Amino acid sequence: MPLKAELHCHIEGAASPDLVIRQAEKYGADPSPFIQNGSFIWHDFTSFLAAYDFSADLFRNEDDYALLAEHYLTSLARDGAIYSEVFTSPDHAKRAGLSPQAYTDALGEGMLRAKAKTAIEGRMIVTGVRHVGVEAIEQAARFAARCGHPLVTGFGVAGDERMGDFEDYV
């Protein structure tokens, strides 16, 4: 089997349908509008985002985020991956009621568990989201630079590229 690396994954969107169903059961949510016959369903970008947001909202604490990272990286390793870089979002952490540090630490814990099981290496790219605003991107960049987590290896910008001019983000 060829060795693989996965270099672009938004971690909240990496939850498998079976993990989302388990999380939905845990929190009393109905996944049926978004998952049918063991697969995510969507018809266009708007419905894709609705499924993404539904899934992301089911990760609410450190244990959930550690489980998400462990589950995802372990599944990558089963498919032959030896390395993964995931995009993380301090804005998702805040939305879940977690500090960016607690969120990052939990994801890191899940990555370490996956590594212990499979030897896969994982790293995090902290991401600022354009459509959340310039201030949020600056906060995310400062967090990435100062958080001190050994698995955080970079910073990026994502989101709606129609928002703002490039020089707004300098």
Image (cartoon, rainbow, N blue to C red):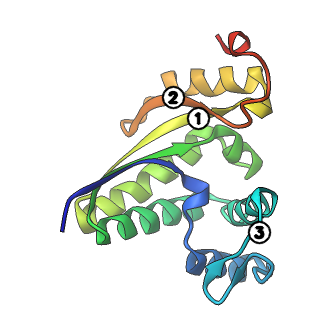
Q: Residue at x 38, y 40 (%)?
A: 151
The CA distance from mark 2 to mark 3 is 31 Å
Among the two numbered marks 2 and 3 on one chain, the one whose residue lies closer to the N terminus: 3
Q: Give the vertical position of 46 relative to 138 (above or below).
A: below
Q: Residue at x 36, y 64 (%)?
A: 76
Q: Looking at the figure, which quarter contains the N terminus? A: bottom left
**Residue 7: % across, % down:** 40, 45
Q: Give the vertical position of 163 relative to 104 (above or below).
A: above
Q: Indicate the amino acid at tag 2.
A: Phe
Residue with the mark numbered 2: 155
Q: How many marks?
A: 3
Q: Nearer the viewer, mark 1 or mark 3?
A: 3
Residue with the mark numbered 1: 127
Tag of residue 43 = 3
Q: Indicate the amino acid at tag 1.
A: Thr
Tag of residue 25 = none
Q: Residues within 10 Å of mark 2 (few under 14, many from 20)?
A: some
Q: Give the vertical position of 156 relative to 74 (above or below).
A: above
- Mark 1, secondary structure of its residue: strand
**Residue 122: % across, % down:** 35, 49
The CA distance from mark 1 to mark 2 is 6 Å
Pointer 1 with pointer 2, Cβ within 8 A: yes
Specify the farthest residue to the bottom. 37
Q: Indicate the amino acid at tag 3.
A: His
Task: Kindly indicate the quadrant of the structure image that contains residue 46.
Answer: bottom right
Task: Kindly indicate the quadrant of the structure image that contains residue 169.
Answer: top right
- Mark 2, secondary structure of its residue: strand
**Residue 113: % across, % down:** 35, 62
**Residue 62: % across, % down:** 58, 57
Looking at the picture, tell me which residue is in the foreground, 41 or 11.
41
